[in-house]
């Protein structure tokens, strides 16, 4: 130990400053802990959002496939109707021509 002991007043001042320092540190730790809680909540929300978006993307892909199937089915029906109509018109024309030239 040194030869110069500190006075009671100096000791009390040092103790008071240390207590203030500890209070500030405690407050900083409390703020950090709260911030960490909020960060964890945010990370969990982002994870749920990512999962939800992934499910929506999968559902949208399935709906796209179903829509494509429906569109193709309507297109196929339309092509059949047009094909039948063309066949009928060609048949009528051939029948008319056959009758005109005396084959029927």
Image: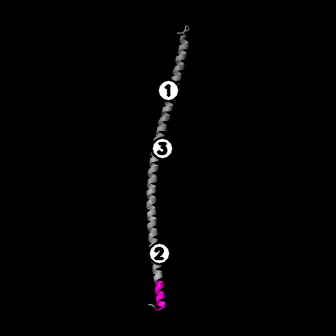
Asked if 69 appears above or below 85 in the picture, the reply is above
Residue at (53% x, 11% y) in the render: 8
**Where residue 48 sits in the image (x, y, percent)?**
45, 45
- From the viewer's perspective, is the residue at label 3 or at label 1 nearer? 3
Residue holding disc 1: 26
First along the sequence among labels 2 and 1: 1
Q: Quadrant of the C terminus?
A: bottom left
- From the viewer's perspective, is the residue at label 2 or at label 1 nearer? 2
Residue holding disc 2: 82
- From the viewer's perspective, is the residue at label 2 or at label 3 nearer? 2
Q: Is residue 48 magenta?
A: no
Residue holding disc 3: 46
Q: Look at the numbered disc 2 and give the secondary structure of its residue.
A: helix
Prevalent SS, magenta region: helix
Looking at the image, do the residues carrying marks 2 and 1 touch, with CB atoms under 8 Å apart?
no
Please tell me how crowded label 2 is: few (under 14), some (14-19), or many (20+) other residues with Cα within 10 Å.
few
Could you say which disc has been placed on residue 66 in the image? none
Q: Look at the numbered disc 3 and give the secondary structure of its residue.
A: helix
Q: Residue lying farthest top?
A: 3
Q: Is residue 97 magenta?
A: yes
**CA gap, disc 2 to disc 3?**
53 Å
Q: Nearer the viewer, residue 15 or 39?
A: 39
Name which quarter of the figure residue 76 lies in.
bottom left
Magenta stretch bounds: 92-102
First along the sequence among labels 2 and 3: 3
**CA gap, disc 2 to disc 1?**
82 Å
Q: Nearer the viewer, residue 43 or 84?
A: 84
């Amino acid at each position: 130990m040194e030869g110069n002991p500190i006075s009671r007043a100096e000791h009390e001042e040092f103790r008071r400053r240390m207590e203030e320092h500890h209070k500030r540190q405690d407050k900083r730790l409390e703020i950090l802990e709260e911030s960490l809680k909020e960060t964890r909540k945010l990370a969990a929300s982002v994870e749920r959002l990512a999962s939800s978006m992934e499910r929506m993307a999968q559902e949208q892909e399935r709906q796209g496939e179903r829509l494509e199937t429906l569109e193709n089915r309507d297109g196929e029906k339309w092509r059949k109707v047009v094909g039948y109509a063309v066949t009928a018109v060609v048949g009528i024309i051939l029948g008319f021509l056959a009758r005109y030239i005396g084959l029927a």
